[in-house]
Amino acid sequence: MTRFGIGYDVHKLVPERKLILGNVEIPHTLGLSGHSDADVLIHAIIDALLGAAALGDIGGHFPDNDDRYKNIDSGELLKKTGELLKNSGYKICNIDSIIVAQKPKLAPHIPEMRKRIAEILQLDVNFVSVKATTEEGLGFTGTEQGISAHAVAGITNDR
């Protein structure tokens, strides 16, 4: 059986934080605020994977009031999510995602994001899609107040 899940995340842009997207540090004057490293792309992918397996959401598995996850590398959370899916009998088929940010320009970083996500989940990079877009100056992402990400994941259950 093939199952699908969707994920969405958003974080506010703030000074004095690193900008981490897709487990890659992106040079920028602002970073994302959050309990962990605030990697909106990884968080959206985690929610898509958990949703596809009907295993809840990122907040249920990695709550923001738990100090174990304070400033954690979201790649670690993605790895734990991949292990949870595998232990529940699921195999990841593909991930499609999009980052919504006015700045910085993300296209040069997308190949590395795809590579890192694939490595963390032990997937072929051809099963991981990352895209980026702006909102032409509209909304909170367009006015550079924050960055959001959307993801869709397909999984199969061989049980």
Image (cartoon, helix red, strand yellow):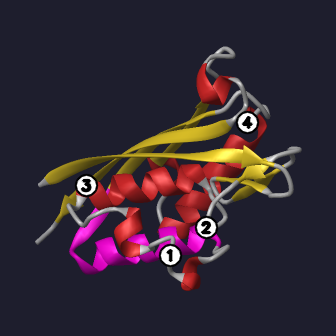
Q: Residue at x 66, y 60 (%)?
A: 23
Quarter assignment of residue 34: bottom right
Task: Name which residue type carries label 3.
Answer: Ala
- Precedes in sequence: disc 4 or disc 1: 1
Q: Is residue 121 above or below residue 27?
A: below
In this figure, which residue is indicated by the disc labeled 2?
Answer: 35
Residue 131, x across and y down, in percent: 57, 34
Q: Is residue 72 above or below residue 29?
A: below
Q: Compare marks 3 and 4 and give the one earlier in the sequence.
A: 3
In contact (CB < 8 Å): disc 3 and disc 4:
no
Q: Residue at x 71, y 24 (%)?
A: 143
Residue position marked by numbered label 1 in the rendering: 65
List the residue tagged with mark 3. Answer: 52
Residue picked out by circle 4: 106
| Helix, strand or loop: magenta stretch | helix
Q: Nearer the viewer, residue 26 or 86?
A: 26
Residues at marks 2 and 3 touching, judged by CB atoms closer than 8 Å: no
Inspect the image, locate mark 2, and give the three-letter code of the amino acid beneath it.
His
42 horizontally vs 108: left or right: left
The secondary element bearing badge 2 is classed as loop
Can you tell which of label 1 and label 3 is closer to the viewer?
Answer: 1
The stretch of residues the image draws in magenta is 73-92
